[in-house]
Amino acid sequence: MKGNLLVVHGGGPTAVINSSLYGVITEAKQNDKIDKIYGAIGGTEAILKENFLDLGKTNDEKLKRLLHTPGTAIGSSRFALEQEDYQEMVKIFKKNNIKYVLFNGGNGSMDTCGKAEKACEGEDIYVVGIPKTIDNDLSIIDHAPGFGSAAKYIAATTAEIGADVKSLPIHVCVIEAMGRNAGWITAASALARKNEKDAPHLIYLPERPFDEEEFLEDVKKLYDELGGVVVVVSEGLKNKDGESIVPPIFKTERAIYYGDVSSHLSNLIIKRLGIKARSEKPGLSGRASIALQSNVDREEAILVGKEAVKAAVAGHTGVMVGINRIPGQKYKIETSLIPIEEVMMHERVLPKEYINERGNDVTKEFIDWCRPLIGEDLLDFLSFKDEM
């Protein structure tokens, strides 16, 4: 008997989350074991409200627009679920003849995916995870869809700001990158360099304790040499005691809100060094930009969406589709199915071999690993400047 499929988005959108949705819908449309293709309109909370939209009725031409649409076409949430909510989900799935459930998201969403799968045991309901995060902090896999586009964005932004600062070398510019406790996006700014003295001149990652005195020493040395300095820092920088380098500005029972790291460090440069400094925080632009979407990222996002459908229909449950890099000179990947308990809430940070000894830059090993993910070359617009 045919069953319905439900796809759910969780957490922050990426530039390619809708590409995975495209992969899910197009694959499900071709499968004779699937009847209706539902989207949960508004994340996990939409499941409990039974706010479902039949995506299978969308024509193919309209579906193609998903590939270049920012945000998430079916909405997302960070809704906090209780244990009884998972039991309620099972009842809702059965009521709506939903046999296949796909959760597309990062660490939190994979935790939800695992808990939902446990609740569905013995109910002939198959639950599969689709990886998604700009932070690239999902464990086990080589990288997650969403990261390649975020990496391309930060590299392009750093290159453009670097060209500006090089043209008028009178200050220090501190760019703040997203990524929470993982420095993958911050590190990707290194792809902006075409020459040794190109921006970024300094990179500071959350995987290393931040040393204020070393930071000021590094900035002063480069300012004296170059006149204009571009620094890229992670929003998750912490001191040697594991505390944010920025004091908290507001607290609730569930969260602590901090000020901007880039503003804090710019002010520090002005106060301690007497050097003009300014901060830049691309913020949500880094995950919303379709103009700088990576073609490699888009194709891989489609692929994992398709593979999730195939896995669920084949009877796999409690797994996430993984991306594995095939060793060799040419960039190639393959997919696999990873037990969800190996992924749930396990945070993957930048390994030490990708960080230089001083802790203010990345290594060539990281650049070689990251470069294929951003797709086509984005730095040709600087070629004229290099020839002058």
Image (spheres, rainbow, N blue to C red):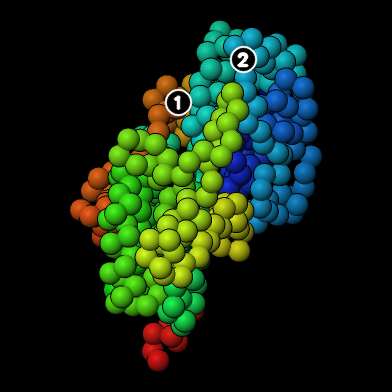
Residue 30, x across and y down, in percent: 65, 38
Q: Which of pointers 2 and 1 lies earlier in the amino acid sequence?
A: 2
Q: Quadrant of the N terminus?
A: top right
Q: Quadrant of the C terminus?
A: bottom left
Residue 129, x across and y down, in percent: 52, 30
Asked if residue 350 is positioned above or below residue 198 in the image, the reply reads: above
Q: Residue 82: give its label.
A: 2
Q: Is residue 329 visible?
A: no
Q: Residues within 10 Å of mark 1 (few under 14, many from 20)?
A: many
Asked if residue 370 is positioned above or below residue 109 in the image, the reply reads: below
User: Which residue is found at the position 39% from the left and 36% from the top?
Assistant: 243
Q: Residues within 10 Å of mark 2 (few under 14, many from 20)?
A: few
* Residue beneath disc 1: 344
Name the residue nearer the viewer: 368 or 313: 368
Q: Is residue 145 left or right of residue 1?
A: left
Asked if residue 107 is positioned above or below residue 195 in the image, the reply reads: above
User: Which residue is found at the position 66% from the left and 40% from the top?
Assistant: 25
User: Which residue is found at the position 50% from the left and 65% from the top?
Assistant: 278
Q: Secondary structure at mark 1?
A: loop
Residue 299, x across and y down, in percent: 52, 52
Q: Is residue 46 visible?
A: yes
User: Which residue is found at the position 62% from the left and 39% from the top?
Assistant: 24
Name the residue nearer the viewer: 55 or 184: 184
Q: CA distance from mark 2 to mark 1?
A: 16 Å
